Image (cartoon, rainbow, N blue to C red):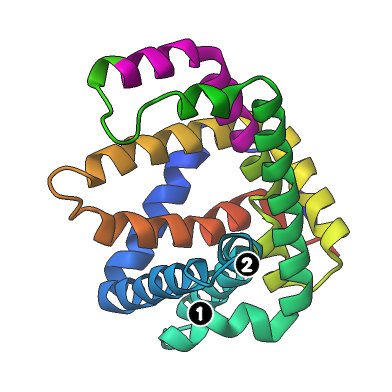
Amino acid sequence: MRVVDVSAASSAAWISEAFTMFRARPLAWISLTSAWLLVSLLITLIPLVGPPLMTMTQPAFFAGFVLACRDQALGLPISTAHLFAGFRVSGRTLIQVGSVSLLAELAVMMTLGAFGFFDTLKAIDRNNPSVEAIAAAFSSLGWQWFAAAAAVFVIKGVLWFTAALIAHQPMPASHAIRWSFFALIGNFVPLAVFGMLMLALLFLALIPWGLGLLMFVPLYAITHYTSFKGVFRADAD
């Protein structure tokens, strides 16, 4: 397996291919991703451990989406059983990747806390919040919001391909993270363009009443497969 450098235009091709796959089996993908959202919500509601556990399990769910895409490409059916396919293939390894994501996000939050990020938010009167107070708080946190968004973007970028890599060829978490990091470095521009396009689609999906999310969420899931297929190639014999 090797990483190839692709053009910035490839990012649009990943989304276009994902839309083609979604359009071929819309009900199956809506059912699968809706089940994912429901299960993730239920995990989050578990007292004390829910939110971190939800973060740790996400790579396994997305590995299931990748396996569903692969089955669709082979002409096989898609079902909600694919949601847990990643756990069956390499559940422990995928949870390790999720743990790395959790630790990285906690490090970002701790760094923000050291700069008084959360203290500023706590200053807002929760019982009687005013628009002026909220606007002033967020205005004073301008650079910190940008730094936090950039840090999360980098974390997500470094780990973007890990679920697909492990689903495609089971490997240790450290190897998957390394491969994913190399893919990010070699294709930073197309991945950045891809992120901006997906953000634009998300904003469109929210208008009106969020009905577009029925399409956007499956597209987000499928692009883990289409982007992986575009960036990684099998070694030539």
Disc with the residue nearer the chain's start (1 vs 2): 2
- Residue 19 placement (x, y as % from top left): 34, 57
Q: CA distance from mark 1 to mark 2?
A: 21 Å
- Residue 182 sits in quarter: top right
The magenta-colored residue range is 133-153
Q: Is residue 119 magenta?
A: no
Q: Residues within 10 Å of mark 2 (few under 14, many from 20)?
A: few
Which image quadrant: the N terminus? bottom right
Q: Residues within 10 Å of mark 1 (few under 14, many from 20)?
A: many
Task: Judge by depth and name the residue closer to the eye, 37 or 17.
Answer: 37
Which image quadrant: the C terminus? bottom right
- Residue 174 placement (x, y as % from top left): 87, 57
Q: Residue at x 45, y 78 (%)?
A: 72
- Residue 62 placement (x, y as % from top left): 56, 66
Mark 1 — residue? 83
Task: Judge by depth and name the residue closer to the eye, 221 or 128.
Answer: 128
Q: Is residue 51 above or below residue 66?
A: above
- Residue 115 sits in quarter: top right
For this view, does 88 lie left or right of residue 26? right
Q: Amino acid at mark 1?
A: Leu
* Most common SS among magenta residues: helix
Query: Which element is circle 1 on?
Result: helix
Number of the front mark, 1 or 2? 2
Mark 2 — residue? 49
Label 1 close to label 2 by CB (< 8 Å)? no
Q: Is residue 170 above or below residue 155?
A: below
Q: Is residue 58 above or below residue 136?
A: below
Q: Is residue 67 visible?
A: yes
Q: Amino acid at mark 2?
A: Val
Q: Which mark is residue 35?
A: none
